[in-house]
Image (cartoon, rainbow, N blue to C red):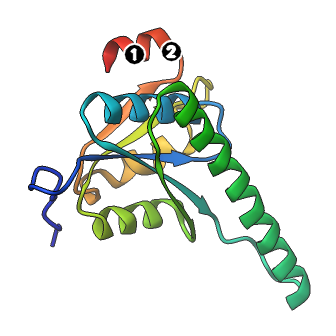
Amino acid sequence: MVSKRLSRVEGHKRKFLAVIDETPECERAVYYAANRAKRTNGTLVMIYVIEPGDFQHWLGVEEIMKAEAHEEAETAVAKFAAMVRERVGIEPETQIREGDTAEEIHSLIEEDQDIAILVLAAGLAKEGPGPLVSTIAGRGAAFPIPVTVIPASLGDEDIEALC
């Protein structure tokens, strides 16, 4: 059963969800989502998902690898949060989770009923739109909210005009 979205209920704000990852197009999705949030009096939520590694090592090595992954996640989220504050002028909410990216995105959407739109950016690579867009598109109706896919080729002025 799909959770009812609460973004239009008094006391709630519509939230735009952007995924932080290592892809070059990630910044386009964050910038678009932040601008949409600002222009519609909403909120930006950024999620970084640490994919489970192949931790078939000794326990100490696994713990070090997980700690490094969390440090990398915190650095990436902080970088994008600073960019949003500086260039758009809003304070984003942030989430760092461990697990399968699509499953964690879905879980967050179910947990936070104010999240109304998932924003992704398509890559410029010849192989396709990028792993996240391909994964999400493959799930289709499994997401209870609209998914907006931003072309990675859009510049800041283009994004601002669209928002």
Q: Secondary structure at mark 1?
A: helix
Question: Is residue 74 visible from the viewing direction of this image?
Answer: yes
Q: Position of residue 132 (x, y in %)?
A: 51, 46
Question: Is residue 58 visible from the viewing direction of this image?
Answer: no
Say which quadrant the N terminus sits in.
Answer: bottom left
Q: Position of residue 108 (x, y in %)?
A: 38, 65
| Residue denoted by label 1 | 160
Q: Secondary structure at mark 2?
A: helix
Between 1 and 81, the residue placed more toward the observer is: 81
- Residue at screen point 59% across, 23% down: 124
Among all residues in the image, which is located at the extreme left? 9
Left or right of 162 in this view: 10: left
Q: Quadrant of residue 73?
A: bottom right
Q: Position of residue 129 (x, y in %)?
A: 51, 32
Among all residues in the image, which is located at the extreme bottom? 59
Q: Relative to 47, say whether 56 is above or below.
A: below
Between 89 and 78, the residue placed more toward the observer is: 89
- Residue at screen point 56% across, 44% down: 131
Tell me the number on the disc at residue 117.
none
How far apart marks 2 and 1 lie (CA) works out to: 6 Å
Q: Relative to 125, say whether 119 is above or below.
A: below
Q: Dot 2, how many residues are within 10 Å of its Cα: few (below 14), some (14-19), or many (20+)? A: few
- Residue at screen point 47% across, 28% down: 88
Q: Relative to 64, say whether 147 is above or below.
A: above
Q: Position of residue 87 (x, y in %)?
A: 54, 25
Q: Dot 1, how many residues are within 10 Å of its Cα: few (below 14), some (14-19), or many (20+)? A: some
- Residue at screen point 24% across, 47% down: 14
| Residue denoted by label 2 | 156
Between 78 and 2, the residue placed more toward the observer is: 78
Please state which amino acid type lies under the numbered disc 2.
Answer: Asp
Please state which amino acid type lies under the numbered disc 1.
Answer: Glu
